[in-house]
Amino acid sequence: METNPVAWQFLASEARPPVVRDIRSDLQLFFDEWLIDGMAGARLKLHPPIEREVVMEYNKPWEGETSGVGVTVFKDGPKYRMWYASGNDHTDDDGKKGKGKKPKLRVRWSGYAESTDAVHWERPELGLIEFEGSKANNLMMNADMGWNLSPFIDGHPEPRYPGNYKALVRLSRDERYDMKALLRGYTSDDGVHWSMIDKDPLIEAPPGYMPRFDSPMSVFWDSRRAMYVAYMRGVVPPGKTRTIRRSVSTDFRNWSVPEEIDLGDSPTEELYMSAATPYFRAPGVYVSFPKRYAAKRTPQPGAQSKGVSETCFMASRDGVSFRRYFMEAIIKPGPDIMNWYKHNTMVATGILETGPAEISLYAVEYHGSPAVRLRRYTARTDGFTSAGTGYGGGEMMTKPFTFEGDTLVINYSTSVVGSMRAELQDREGRAVEGFKLEDCEEIYGDEIERVVKWKGGTLSDFQHQPVRLRFAMSKETDLYSIRFRNAT
């Protein structure tokens, strides 16, 4: 097995020997050093998703240049469902925007669409909200009810409020609260007909929070931690840098004061939103697609305000600390000048499983123009990041861990000349007889689930004992995830 003979780079931040991780039979993604002890010639890699088709053009009379912001998608039974903001931007009376001009709210709605394949989306006629004398549209909420609807399926075993769906909504025009930075709660039996939980807001921005809740939120029930979690816009004084705040609740009525998430020692950047969501294959892991905003850069010619944006990637194992190992963008504006504007490439909240080895996400394009639309992107299952090598090859070694199961399954890919082998070690890093590199069947190809086989047989005798794994990879090989399970 050819590997790059460079010195090991140990990633463990705690004093050696490292702690023993208990991974049970949970899927393990490689986006940080949590399970990785060291690498030699290998590194953590970011894999941008592939641009696919435009799935929705916001061209209905009740839609407009600011449609597509605040999109939420998820699979619900046999259908894929989508909720999105629909409307035009704030303008003054003569239709021009600018500093010092008095704003006039033109249109703000919440729209709904559904699909059987996550590609072809339909706007069902709901008959709920009147627009220009007709209710023949797909609108669910008007501006008087609130903005930035953030729906989710309520998985609480004994919810305080009835309804299969819950949502947080930013307060709109309200004389009682004068449009402060406040969020109300809504509930629904079907995700379309929404009822206000309480006139009083559920969440209020903490002192020093200057802007209102004016950007999309991510809200969900975390069954692993038995709590509701919400991510929303924040601002860090004194420079008023945009960032992300988090609030949690056990009953959906009493929420913690929104606090800034921990981004470690990464460089300070303007992050407008999070699109954070639990990754459906890895319990306890959140993936997030924050919008990186360059406020002072000039967008495409003719734009009415400054600012350009792109999408980054980060993930978390506790919902609070998001380690930004990948500072590069995962979705850039690209060569189309129409996307060089402040709200483009904004990713929808939610990841859809759309094939045996495919996941889909969505991002807005041409925002701020009459041609605003939504595009689908696809990624390999578990494939936003990997522990991988270039042509020179390399190795990766895990920290000690305990597991449940008798079989190791990996998600990997190699070049046609690349390959991989795995070695089971004891806690101190000594190879186990029958499970050394030379005892492992050579692995090459591209598979979401590949069973690793050794001459020593199954791994049943090593369950609940501290072990390590060493992966030797050659010539352009990527390891996306691993999981232990019982053979079927």
Image: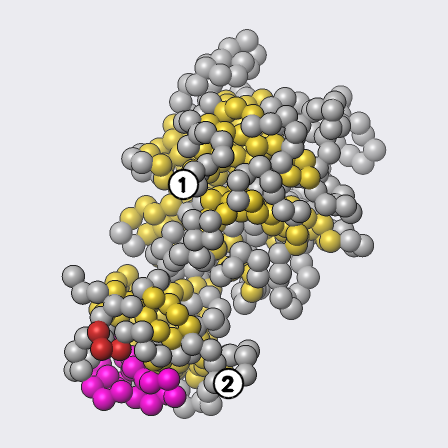
Front residue of 319/414: it is 319
Location of residue 257 in the rendering, given as x and y in whole percent from the top left corner? 66, 47
Question: Rounded to the nearest whole Å, what is the CA distance between mark 1 and mark 2?
Answer: 41 Å
Which amino acid type is shown beneath numbered disc 2?
Answer: Arg
| Badge number at residue 16 | 2
Residue 269 against residue 420 in the figure, above or below: above
Can I make out residue 50 in this image? Answer: no
**Magenta stretch, main secondary structure class:** loop
Residue 480 against residue 425 in the figure, above or below: above
The residue that label 1 is drawn on is 157
Quadrant of the rendered structure where residue 382 is?
bottom left
Location of residue 444 in the rendering, given as x and y in whole percent from the top left corner? 25, 73
Q: Which residues are magenta?
A: 421-446
Residue 145 against residue 241 in the figure, above or below: above
Q: Residue furthest right?
A: 100
Question: Few, some or many C-alpha atoms within 10 Å of disc 2 (few <14, some 14-19, many ≥20)?
Answer: few
